[in-house]
Image (spheres, grey):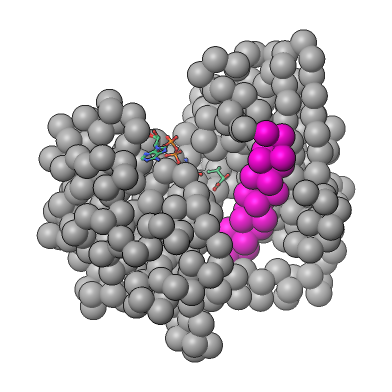
Amino acid sequence: MELFKYMEKYDYEQLLFCQDKESGLKAIIAIHDTTLGPALGGTRMWMYNSEEEAIEDALRLARGMTYKNAAAGLNLGGGKTVIIGDPRKDKNEAMFRAFGRFIQGLNGRYITAEDVGTTVADMDIIYQETDYVTGISPEFGSSGNPSPATAYGVYRGMKAAAKEAFGSDSLEGKVIAVQGVGNVAYHLCRHLHEEGAQLIVTDINKEAVQRAVEEFGAKAVDPNDIYGVDCDIFAPCALGGIINDQTIPQLKAKVIAGSANNQLKEPKHGDIIHEMGIVYAPDYVINAGGVINVADELYGYNRERAMKKIEQIYDNIEKVFAIAKRDSIPTYKAADRLAEERIETMRKSRSQFLQNGHHILSRRRGR
Ligand SMILES: NC(=O)C1=CN([C@@H]2O[C@H](COP(=O)(O)OP(=O)(O)OC[C@H]3O[C@@H](n4cnc5c(N)ncnc54)[C@H](O)[C@@H]3O)[C@@H](O)[C@H]2O)C=CC1
Ligand SMILES: CC(C)CC(=O)C(=O)O
């Protein structure tokens, strides 16, 4: 990949490579856009097949955070970190302390949190080195694990999508196929079960599947079979790129609404599902509950205030559908328009984030 060419194409600000031999840290921090404020986005730890794959993931996820934070109405820009390694074997305290010092060196341009492969315990270690970390333990007055908040936002957004597709936002009796029943989807399934939905689940982790079967009466299917099951709603809650040339012809759902980041393999797949009449709730709008929750820590965490904002994901999804109709475009493009319009409006009145400017972080310093 020609890095500067790619960064120029999508207007990235900064890409950092952080290495610490003693602890084995190999981290890539990507900062996409700080027009709205400091870049906030989680840290993913994953066994990438190559450094190039890790860089691509960091860049793509960082840009997604710019759009997610903008569409959610947060005064935050977009960034993300990937750490190369096996989260089950390669973690150690020194690694996250070293990573925390690298973040501190950015002086507030980037704030981290959890993502796939990292936990509240990891954020607590990072917090020993820097204030620019969220999703830390409630014992520190913070919001803890963002997954239940993400799940609640997806549940609210799914209701809005159901209203668009079926004329009612009730999920009672709806058949919902959930791909991946990890941290987010476990809580999502709980909300759906409580509302009387019928669940079909899959996961490569058999224990996770068993838990959903036992607690929510879900029916289990093999991972390859989830796309073609008879259902009303498909909820992708594992990894990205799963709406693609191979999976689209199998889909029977009328709605796609789930937590996974970067669900569309390529933009053209958003066009294809639009033409098929599938109501797609764009990933970064529906899965913003976690970032809304951790971002509230920057004001001194208030759960009630955060949950109120997460509830509004229902309205944000409705806004996206309205723009899609107004401009006769697919919903994934409408979401981009919502985010870009907000960034452009703000760009006119402020430029890059300045730590010593007046900003939410200046309120946090006195904590
Ligand atoms: N945790 C959060 O608050 C947020 C998560 N997301 C996104 O939501 C998705 C899920 O996140 P988490 O629940 O935190 O991750 P997780 O790692 O706890 O759950 C993902 C689950 O998917 C399963 N899985 C992986 N590959 C699979 C496959 N091919 N078929 C079926 N299952 C498979 C895993 O075994 C795991 O149980 C990710 O894409 C993440 O980036 C987005 C916003 C916030
Ligand atoms: C705090 C995280 C849930 C934010 C993030 O990285 C994401 O929404 O993907």
| Residue at (26, 52) in percent of width and height | 177
Give the magenta part as a residue range: 50-71
Q: Is residue 158 left or right of residue 72?
A: left
Q: Is residue 274 left or right of residue 342?
A: left
Q: Is residue 112 visible?
A: no
Quick one: quadrant of the C terminus? Answer: top right
Q: How many marks?
A: 0
| Residue at (66, 76) in percent of width and height | 341
Q: Please name whichever residue, 177 or 251, is drawn nearer the observer in this view of the structure.
A: 251
Above or below residue 298? Residue 235 is below
Above or below residue 358? Residue 55 is above
Q: Is residue 62 left or right of residue 280?
A: right
Q: Please name whichever residue, 316 or 327, is drawn nearer the observer in this view of the structure.
A: 327
| Among the 4 quarters of the image, the one containing residue 108 | top right
| Residue at (34, 64) in percent of width and height | 249
| Residue at (56, 22) in percent of width and height | 86
- Residue 76 x, y percent position in the rendering: 68, 55
Magenta portion: prevailing SS class:
helix
- Residue 103 x, y percent position in the rendering: 77, 33
- Residue 18 x, y percent position in the rendering: 79, 29
Q: Is residue 146 magenta?
A: no
- Residue 59 x, y percent position in the rendering: 70, 49
Q: Is residue 324 visible?
A: yes
Q: Is residue 68 magenta?
A: yes
